[in-house]
């Protein structure tokens, strides 16, 4: 047993990598705290906690394997990416834009993947697609639904109405499907943003392991989006049939649990995950680890000057990280000023009663609004 443990040696980590990691730790404190809170806040309904550990396991699985010949250009690119992410964190810190600071964590993952040579190891992983996998730990669904939710609702209603029109007389009005006297509403959860997010996460995971060229990955991404739309359209079609014609589905209440979620998972599996897995197995991957091409020595050995430059840059990066996290936050309100609201003294005979703010409301208004903006003339 002891001999087995001695044989498991982790790769040697240079001093510059330790310094950069320390700087990243400083910079990531505020974004990580905010991101962690979104994982456990019911308002976000996020699965980011499990996705985060999926990215960590994937990184560790590749990092603990023997490394190959890594060009120094990857290390340089990683350093400049970290510096670019630091500039974005200045804006995030000064304006208290939490989502922007959290998005830079994905850039950190990409940079660390380049600097640790994940794509050149025996168990190779694409640093870019690993960063994409980590990006799904962010509350993406809460960002996409306000932007694309209504459009996806309309597209889903049109698609489901087209399938239902093959067998039944159906009429669609916006996001409403009229079938057999039933008014079926395609609400925001039925827009398909959550199922599309899971399918795209699965696609990013496959691409991280397969490592195809960009010209091949882009069509695969479009196919993944098309499969997500198809799976959600078929799901809505089956739910509509179950609502309008209960006898077709054996008088099962398709809107109750667990039937509602199981129907969605089944169609996501058969119309999304399995076809995507079948297609990915036929994509040509990056065979650089099986047939390593000779790399010129000048691209492998950075030289003394670049080694010293990296050390100074790493020290400067730590100093900048300490400076950035110490900057005071000044949230900017870009909305136009509003006049004080004059509330009525009574409503239908009920007198107005001033209630104190809750602890959560007080913390919110104190943080983001000056005291003068909360006045009222009640």
Image (tube, rainbow, N blue to C red):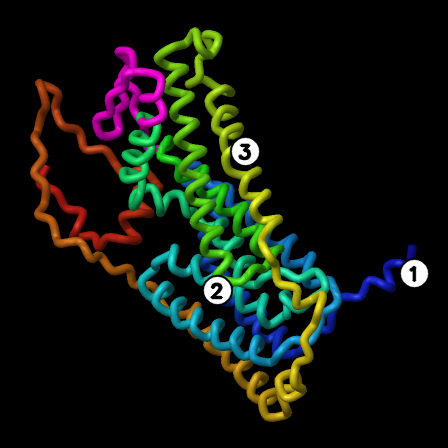
Residue at the image point whose x is 49% and y is 62% from the top? 214
Which mark identifies residue 269? 3
Give the farthest residue toward the front.
166
**Residue 45 within the segment the image draws in magenta:** no
Q: Are marks 2 and 3 in contact (CB under 8 Å)?
A: no
Please name the residue that numbered disc 1 is placed on: 3
**Residue 175 within the segment the image draws in magenta:** yes
Q: Are marks 1 and 3 in contact (CB under 8 Å)?
A: no
Residue at the image point whose x is 54% and y is 79% from the top? 76
Counting from the top left corner in percent of width and height, residue 346 is at: 9, 25
Would residue 20 be seen by someone viewing this image from the given angle? Answer: yes
> What whole-number distance in Å separates the C-alpha atoms at marks 1 and 2?
38 Å
The one nearer the camera, 278 or 187, is 278
174 displayed left or right of 343 = right
- Please state, as top left, top right, bottom left or bottom right, where the C terminus lies in the image: top left
Q: Nearer the viewer, mark 1 or mark 3?
A: 3
Mark 1 Cα shell of 10 Å, populated few (<14), some (14-19), many (≥20): few
The one nearer the camera, 22 or 130, is 130
User: Regarding mark 2 in the picture, which secondary structure is present there?
Assistant: helix
Mark 3 Cα shell of 10 Å, populated few (<14), some (14-19), many (≥20): some
User: Regarding mark 3 in the picture, which secondary structure is present there?
Assistant: helix
Vertically, is 157 above or below 248? below
- Looking at the image, tell me whether mark 1 or mark 2 is earlier in sequence order: 1
- Please state, as top left, top right, bottom left or bottom right, where the N terminus lies in the image: bottom right
> What whole-number distance in Å separates the C-alpha atoms at marks 2 and 3?
30 Å
Counting from the top left corner in percent of width and height, residue 72 is at: 60, 80
Range covered by the magenta-colored residues: 162-188
- Looking at the image, tell me whether mark 2 or mark 3 is earlier in sequence order: 2
Residue at the image point whose x is 44% and y is 68% from the top? 325
Please name the residue that numbered disc 2 is placed on: 107
């Amino acid at each position: 047993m002891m001999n087995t443990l001695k044989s498991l040696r982790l790769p040697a980590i240079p001093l510059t990598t330790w310094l950069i990691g320390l700087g990243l730790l400083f910079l990531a404190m505020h974004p990580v705290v905010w991101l962690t809170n979104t994982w456990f806040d019911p308002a976000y309904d996020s699965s980011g906690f499990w996705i985060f550990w999926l990215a960590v396991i994937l990184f560790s699985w590749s990092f603990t394997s023997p490394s190959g010949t890594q060009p120094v250009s990857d290390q340089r690119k990683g350093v400049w990416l970290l510096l670019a992410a630091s500039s974005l964190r200045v804006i995030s810190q000064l304006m208290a834009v939490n989502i922007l600071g959290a998005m830079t964590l994905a850039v950190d993952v990409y940079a660390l993947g380049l600097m640790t040579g994940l794509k050149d190891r025996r168990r190779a992983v694409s640093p870019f697609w690993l960063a994409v996998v980590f990006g799904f730990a962010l509350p993406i669904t809460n960002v996409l639904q306000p932007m694309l939710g209504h459009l996806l609702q309309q597209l889903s209603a049109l698609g489901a109405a087209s399938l239902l029109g093959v067998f039944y007389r159906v009429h669609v009005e916006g996001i409403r499907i009229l079938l057999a006297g039933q008014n079926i509403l395609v609400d925001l959860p039925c827009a398909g943003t959550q199922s599309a997010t899971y399918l795209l996460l699965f696609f990013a995971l496959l691409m991280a392991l397969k490592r195809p060229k960009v010209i091949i990955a882009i069509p695969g991404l479009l196919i993944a989006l098309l499969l997500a739309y198809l799976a959600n359209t078929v799901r809505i079609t089956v739910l509509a049939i179950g609502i309008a014609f209960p006898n077709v589905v054996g008088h099962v209440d398709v809107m109750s649990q667990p039937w509602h979620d199981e129907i969605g998972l089944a169609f996501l599996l058969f119309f999304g995950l399995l076809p995507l897995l079948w297609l990915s197995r036929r994509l040509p991957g990056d065979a650089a680890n099986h047939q390593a091409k000779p790399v010129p020595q000048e691209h492998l050995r950075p030289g003394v000057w670049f080694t010293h430059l990296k050390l100074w840059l790493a020290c400067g990066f730590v100093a900048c990280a300490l400076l950035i996290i110490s900057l005071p936050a000044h949230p900017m309100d870009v909305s136009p000023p509003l006049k004080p609201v004059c509330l009525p003294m009574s409503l239908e005979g009920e007198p107005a009663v001033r209630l104190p703010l809750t602890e959560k409301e007080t913390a919110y208004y104190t943080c983001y609004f000056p005291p003068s903006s909360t006045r009222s003339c009640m």
